[in-house]
Image (cartoon, rainbow, N blue to C red):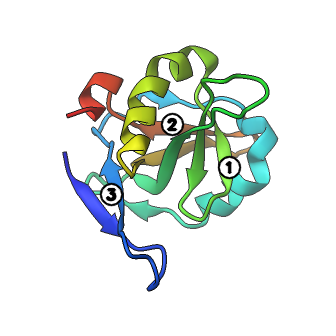
Amino acid sequence: MKILPFRQNDQDPQPVGYLDGSCGDFALAIAGEASYQPAIRKARRQVTKDNSGRLVIAVLVRCEPTNPHDENAVRVSTLVGDTLGYLSRENAQVYCAAISAIEQSGRTVRCNATFYGGDQARPTIGVWLDLKSPADLLP
């Protein structure tokens, strides 16, 4: 597991750590993208190429226990906090405990995401995550 240090600002006494949750498969689709198209379009303009040439962007995957629709909600956002969508209810139920444990240790799960659609045939842009399984996220 690779932890990348990050300081919020120069006054932060404790660095915040990102846990790299990427695994290389981009097999986890997120849900609710239709509600976040402006943020997704903005994020898509900031993509970079990974080692395989795929266009990706780093995203944060965080539990949202105060979500009024699902106490196990897991939000996917850009590094600047723009919401791109959520894990499906089924996936959130599986991932929430692992992500919560990581967050309680002072770290945030970060992984890569890629986009599909956004053309005439599929005008809505979808997002797929390169995220390890919950068991592989934990030490």
Q: Mark 1 or mark 2, which is nearer the start of the sequence?
A: 1
Q: Where residue 128 is drawn, which disc sits there?
A: 2
Quarter placement of the N terminus:
top left
Crowding near pointer 1: few (<14 within 10 Å), some, many (20+)? many
Name the amino acid type tagged 1.
Answer: Thr
Asked if residue 46 is positioned above or below residue 103 in the image, the reply reads below
Residue at the far top: name it. 90
Residue 47 left/right relative to 50 = right
Asked if residue 42 is positioned above or below residue 103 in the image, the reply reads below
Name the amino acid type tagged 3.
Answer: Asp
Quarter placement of the C terminus:
top left
Q: Which residue is mark 1?
A: 83
Residue 92 left/right relative to 42 = left
- Between 111 and 45, the residue placed more toward the observer is 111
**Residue drawn at x 41%, y 28% as measured from the top left:** 27
Name the amino acid type tagged 2.
Answer: Trp
**Residue drawn at x 77%, y 24% as measured from the top left:** 69
* Disc 2/disc 1 C-alpha distance (Å): 14 Å
Tell me where residue 5 sits by quadrant. bottom left
Residue 89 left/right relative to 62 = right
SS class, disc 1? strand
* Disc 2/disc 3 C-alpha distance (Å): 15 Å
Q: Which residue is mark 3?
A: 50
Asked if residue 91 is positioned above or below residue 49 in the image, the reply reads above
**Percent of width and height locating residue 79:** 53, 61
**Residue drawn at x 53%, y 42% as measured from the top left:** 62
- Between 109 and 33, the residue placed more toward the observer is 109
**Residue drawn at x 27%, y 38% as measured from the top left:** 23
